[in-house]
Amino acid sequence: MYKKISLSFDQIPQLSSRDQAYQLGANALQGFYEHDVALSSFEEVVKVKKAQKINRNLIVRELEHQYADIIDKEKVEQHIKALGDEGTYTIITAHQPSLLTGPLYFIYKICSVISLTRQLNQHYSDFKVVPAFILGGEDHDFEEIATMRMFGQEFTWETDQKGSTGRMSLDGVDKVLGEVKERFGESTYAGDLRELIDQAFSASSTYGEFMFRLVHSLFGAHGLVILNMDN
């Protein structure tokens, strides 16, 4: 069991004053965005999005292709199919394929998107919303994704590869994964995490594919639709 404590955004000192002002609807910022920060604003947002014509068939076809070899995807498949419907919209976040997700806000971003879609689907009945995550595998900034910190220790993937990080081979990844898994120790979920990482690694041939599978193993049961933009 856990105890849930709710805090106002202005009580969280780790957030910048600008972020706090946005969340609290400060008058000084309202000229910089179109819609109020409230669930009730999404009805107007949907009206704007409805006027934007996109090729839904192309999106669905590409997502089906990217998920072709992914297992345990029933809820994700339902969401992909729903994206072909004119009454379905997405809440999207994105991040580079950081080493084993890298900074914790990689996870927070995804959790926030899943939470918001649930709230919207409970609040509105005339349209459907699905959570989506763009895995920025086309990004070339290897230094930004190559290091992660855990339990006060730094782990770095060493490789001479260049170019799109998502297209890189898994050369050297196994070494750093071994170091990380050893640091897990014997905590309650250590064995589960090792298994998730090993399964994603053994089924992949590129780093982008590895991260795609890993994120799906963490959030696929919640229906998170992952899109690799590097196509």
Image (cartoon, rainbow, N blue to C red):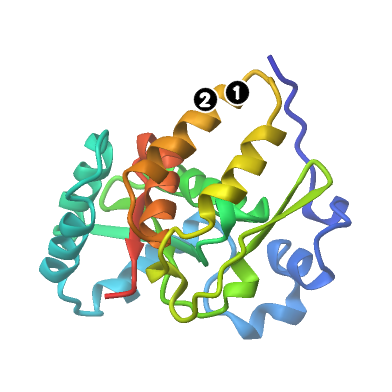
Q: Which residue is mark 1?
A: 189
The residue depicted at 49 percent of the width and 49 percent of the height is: 116
Q: Is residue 122 something that shows in the picture?
A: no
Residue 65, by quadrant, is bottom left
Left-right relation of 110 to 5: left
Query: Which residue is at a point 53% across and 79% down the rendered structure image?
Result: 34
Query: Which residue, given by chain and number where applicable, does mark 2 sit on?
Result: 192
Circle 1/circle 2 CB separation < 8 Å: yes
Question: Where residue 225 appears, x then y in whole percent?
Answer: 33, 52
Q: Residue at x 35, y 47 (%)?
A: 124
Estimate the x, y position of residue 13 in percent, counting from the top left. 89, 56
Q: Is any atom of residue 184 visible in this view?
A: yes
Q: Is residue 134 above or below residue 76?
A: below
Mark 2 surroundings within 10 Å by alpha-carbon count, few (fewer than 14), some (14 through 19), many (20 or more): few
73 or 164: nearer the viewer: 164
- Local secondary structure at mark 1: loop
Mark 2 falls on what kind of element?
Answer: helix
Q: Nearer the viewer, residue 26 or 93?
A: 93
- Counting from the top left corner in percent of width and height, residue 99 is at 58, 56
